[in-house]
Image: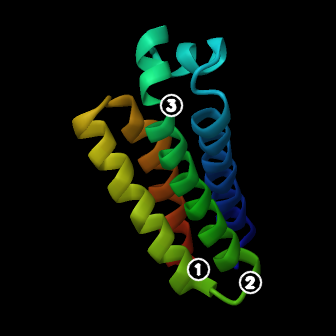
Amino acid sequence: METLSMIAISIVITLHLVFLVLEMFMWNTPLGRKTFGLKTEYARQSATLAANQGLYNGFLAAGLLWGLVGSGGSDALLFFLGCIIIAGTYGAITVKPLILWIQALPAAIAMALVLLTC
């Protein structure tokens, strides 16, 4: 696998691990509330849902790691990157357009690079 695609995938993995930490452990902290633009009461009420979402982000990162260094290979990478692109697009439509650029675009770039090296 080309170095550039490995770097792009590593960036996507890192982003999703950051999302995991923010959503699972920092949602109801000043940093978490500021990052997601949440009011204190809403953050408190939605913390369990955010933790669940963070766990899913961790699964996406684990799947990419499996594809990158484990036995998953390019099929696993393409599957998990596709999941991230779909989730990021859905989030951009339903929550905030910025999600398209922060989540879907890095995954799309990584996917393009993987496809170019297959």
Alpha-carbon distance for marks 1 and 2? 17 Å
The percent position of residue 81, horizontal first and vertical second, equals 48, 65
* Dot 2: element: loop
Q: Which residue is mark 1?
A: 117
Q: Tell me, yes or no, if residue 118 can be seen here.
A: no
Real-space CA distance between mark 3 and mark 2, rounded to the nearest whole angstrom: 33 Å
Residue ID for mark 2: 70
Q: Mark 3 or mark 2, which has the lower sequence index?
A: 3
Mark 1: secondary structure: helix
Residue located 75% across and 68% down the image? 3
Instruction: Kindly identify the residue that appears in the image at 57 percent across and 83 percent down.
Output: 74
- Label 2 crowd bin: few (<14), some (14–19), many (20+), radius 10 Å: few
Q: Quadrant of the N terminus?
A: bottom right
- Mark 1 / mark 3, whichever is N-terminal: 3
C-beta proximity under 8 Å, tags 1 and 2 = no
- Estimate the x, y position of residue 90 in percent, counting from the top left: 27, 47
Task: Say whether marks 1 and 3 touch (CB < 8 Å).
Answer: no
**Which amino acid does the dot numbered 1 rest on?**
Thr
